[in-house]
Image: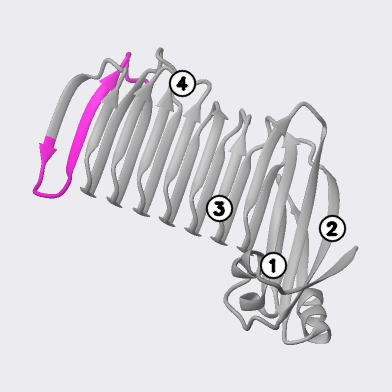
Amino acid sequence: MTRKLHVTALACLLLAACGSGAADETIVAGLEERRIALAGRTLVLDADNGSVTVTGRQDSTATLQFEKRARGADDEEAQRHLEGISIESQERGDTYTLRLRSSHADKTVVDVRVQVPYKTPLRLDVANGGVEIAAMAAPLTVEVGNGSVRIKGAAHHLDVRTGNGDLTVEMAGFRDETAVRLEAGNGSIALGLPASVSAAVEAETQVGAIEVRGLALAERAEEKSATGGRLRGVLGNGSGRIALRTRNGSIVLRGGS
């Protein structure tokens, strides 16, 4: 399905997501859907420009919607850019990989909405775009170049990094030996944890403050600098591991999520 949008003042909001351009450019959009039987495999998504939204559900298959947008000087050029977007799939061993590519990456955006079995391990690699994940009880690996990350209802290992953007994570469960690593280049980090969590904690920021709320952090050790600081401590019996690091931004660790 393809639809055309001629840019008006209102449509300029949409154009901004495709990058700056002349006010008389044309935007075209297309929607593609895929259903995948993952059979316990890790789902890997590698994307250039666009947001990614993932929701866990009780099902045996994953459903993915790709909302593609492209801009050009006229209808023909915009359509050509749209057709230059490819979604390549590869099945290898225990992984199923989808790669989103464009022959004119500066002229296109693909927003992805995923509904996936909640115990499916995920690996997301997004160059430019925000990521939102909800209700997943499997290991999550997320790397974003530019964009914020919001995760709600996680209950397994997390390895999340962003170059520019805030990280906000609310964990619904924390198993023994769970490992959580959250890293930001420029952005704040907020991690919400169950009150009964057990983990060794290390948090560090070069520019910003570190706060702990509603958690009994034992063996607490703090180092403060003129602009930032480092915090170490233990929650419960210390069986898991939590590592939080940012260059520029605050860190908040709170209980009762």
What residue is drawn where x is 64% and y is 61%?
A: 47
Q: How far apart, in angstroms, are the residues tagged by discs 1 and 4?
A: 38 Å
Q: Position of residue 101 (x, y in %)?
A: 69, 70
Among numbered discs 2 and 3, the one appearing first in the sequence: 2
Q: How far apart, in angstroms, are the residues tagged by discs 4 and 2?
A: 36 Å
Q: How far apart, in angstroms, are the residues tagged by discs 4 and 3?
A: 22 Å
Of 76 and 193, the residue lying toward us: 76
Q: From the viewer's perspective, is 209 left or right of 158?
A: left
Point out the stretch of residues depicted in magenta: 223-239
Identity of the amino acid at label 2?
Answer: Glu
Q: How far apart, in angstroms, are the residues tagged by discs 3 and 1?
A: 20 Å
Is residue 180 highlighted in magenta? Answer: no
Q: Position of residue 31 (x, y in %)?
A: 83, 59
**Residue designated by label 1:** 11
What residue is drawn where x is 33% and y is 29%?
A: 253
What residue is drawn where x is 29% and y is 29%?
A: 201
Identity of the amino acid at label 4?
Answer: Ser
Q: Is residue 115 above or below residue 220?
A: below
Q: Secondary structure at mark 2?
A: strand
Q: Nearer the viewer, mark 1 or mark 2?
A: 1
**Residue designated by label 4:** 257
Identity of the amino acid at label 1?
Answer: Ala
**Residue designated by label 2:** 32
Q: From the viewer's perspective, is 257 left or right of 65?
A: left
Do tag 3 and tag 1 residues touch (Cβ < 8 Å)?
A: no
Among numbered discs 4 and 2, the one appearing first in the sequence: 2
Number of other residues with Cα within 10 Å of mark 4, as a class: few under 14, some 14 to 19, many 20 or more: some
Do tag 4 and tag 3 residues touch (Cβ < 8 Å)?
A: no
**Residue lying furthest right in this view?**
1
**Residue designated by label 3:** 130
What residue is drawn where x is 70% and y is 64%?
A: 100
